[in-house]
Image (spheres, rainbow, N blue to C red):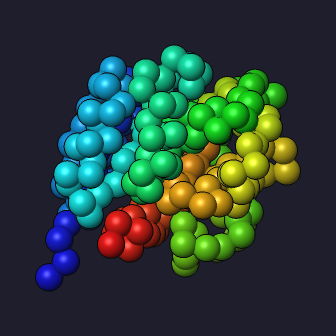
Amino acid sequence: MAEPLRLVFIDNFDSFTWNLVDEFARRGADVEVWRNTVDPGHALARVRERRPSLLVLSPGPGAPAGAGCCVDLVRLAARSRVPLFGVCLGHQAMVEAFGGVVGPAGEVVHGKISRIAHQGGALFQGVPSPFAVGRYHSLAAEVLPDCLQPIAGTDHVVMAVAHRSAPQFGVQFHPESILTPEGGTIIDNVIRWAADAGE
């Protein structure tokens, strides 16, 4: 029998954190939640101890520069090939970690439904394109670094990225939101992908 996926979940002091934690826990994942004030090297060491494992960076208020250890942790995880999934602010931290630019999204979208198109792949297996997502953000990726590939978006906003060589995905939308009907499928896909990547 396969071991449960073990998550180290970085909490960016957001009201959505525990909804997202619950989505992973309900699927059998063993989740440890740490605040973003943790030392990034210590967090990464803990993830390595807990294989098969996944590092999740939660949504949160503000910009990546104010997200504690997250930007450093993205870089460390990429070098160590530790699977990482960033949501909203976590996604933006991925963009800035590798030299991209995050700025005003053009409109503030808190609790807005958008339809986005995706390019398939492990994250979107079984998800139709386009599909509806719940958005809660005022910042977005303006310029992507070369190492991040856009894999979903609206006409004007990158809504998901994949690292070209490290096991990392980021999504600007909230898969745990009731406004994202396919969110459960996406979380299932993240768990499956992380288990495979950690082998």
The residue sitting at the left extreme is: 1
Q: Residue furthest right?
A: 155
Residue for point 36% across, 25% down = 36
User: Which quadrant does the C terminus fall into?
Assistant: bottom left
Q: Is residue 15 left or right of residue 183?
A: left
Query: Of residues 186 and 81, which is closer to you in this image?
Result: 81
Q: For the point 34% across and 54% down, which residue is it?
A: 54
Percent coordinates x, y for residue 82 in the rendering: 40, 54
Residue 151 found in image quarter: bottom right
Which residue is nearer to you in this view: 46 or 57? 46
- Seen from this angle, which residue lies furthest bottom? 1
- What's the residue at 23%, 43% (across, down)? 46
Q: Is residue 117 left or right of residue 124?
A: right
Residue 129, x across and y down, in percent: 70, 70
Whether residue 62 is visible to the viewer of this picture, yes or no, is yes
Q: Is residue 111 visible?
A: no
In this rendering, would 35 be left or right of 151?
A: left
Q: Report the residue at 65% width, 73% height from top.
A: 120
Asked if residue 129 is positioned above or below residue 41 in the image, the reply reads: below
Location of residue 63 in the rendering, given as x and y in whole percent from the top left corner = 59, 22
Q: Report the front residue among 73 and 172.
A: 73
